Image (cartoon, grey):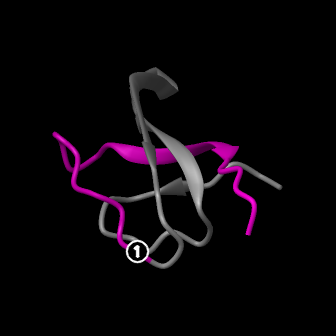
Amino acid sequence: MAKANLTPGTKAPKSWQYVITWPRWWTYWNAEITAIKWKPLPPTQEPWYTYTLVDETKHNS
């Protein structure tokens, strides 16, 4: 699966862990969030920051 770049407020397609990315040099912020499926992603410090998926959340359901 290709890495998704999602904007803040977009509903997360799956429960994944995301890092904050900004367009300049596609650098990663050091913060990770865990998004819940179909819940909107939280706001970022700047409007041009996006979320890039890192790892699928592991659970036993």
Residue underneath mark 1 = 39
Amino acid type at circle 1 is Lys
How crowded pointer 1 is (Cα within 10 Å; few <14, some 14-19, many 20+) is rated as some
29 vs 48: above or below? above
51 vs 35: above or below? above
Q: Position of residue 33 (x, y in %)?
A: 42, 43
- Residue shown at 70% from the left, 56% from the top: 59
Which residue range is magenta in the image?
39-61
Indicate left or right for 54 with 19 as reference: right
Q: Where is residue 30 in the image (x, y as percent from the top left)?
A: 40, 20
Q: Residue furthest left?
A: 45
- Residue shown at 59% from the left, 62% from the top: 15
Indicate left or right for 2 with 36 as reference: right
The prevailing secondary structure element of the residues shown in magenta is loop
Q: Judge whether residue 49 is colored magenta.
A: yes
Q: Which residue lies furthest to the bottom in this view?
A: 38
Q: Where is residue 9 in the image (x, y as percent from the top left)?
A: 30, 68
- Residue shown at 46% from the left, 24% from the top: 28
Q: Which residue lies furthest to the front in this view?
A: 60
- Residue shown at 39% from the left, 71% from the top: 10
Q: Quadrant of the C terminus?
A: bottom right
Indicate left or right for 39 with 59 as reference: left
Instruction: Report the front residue among 49 and 9.
Output: 9
Question: Which type of secondary structure does the marked residue at label 1 adopt?
Answer: loop
Q: Where is residue 1 in the image (x, y as percent from the top left)?
A: 83, 55
Q: Judge whether residue 34 is colored magenta.
A: no
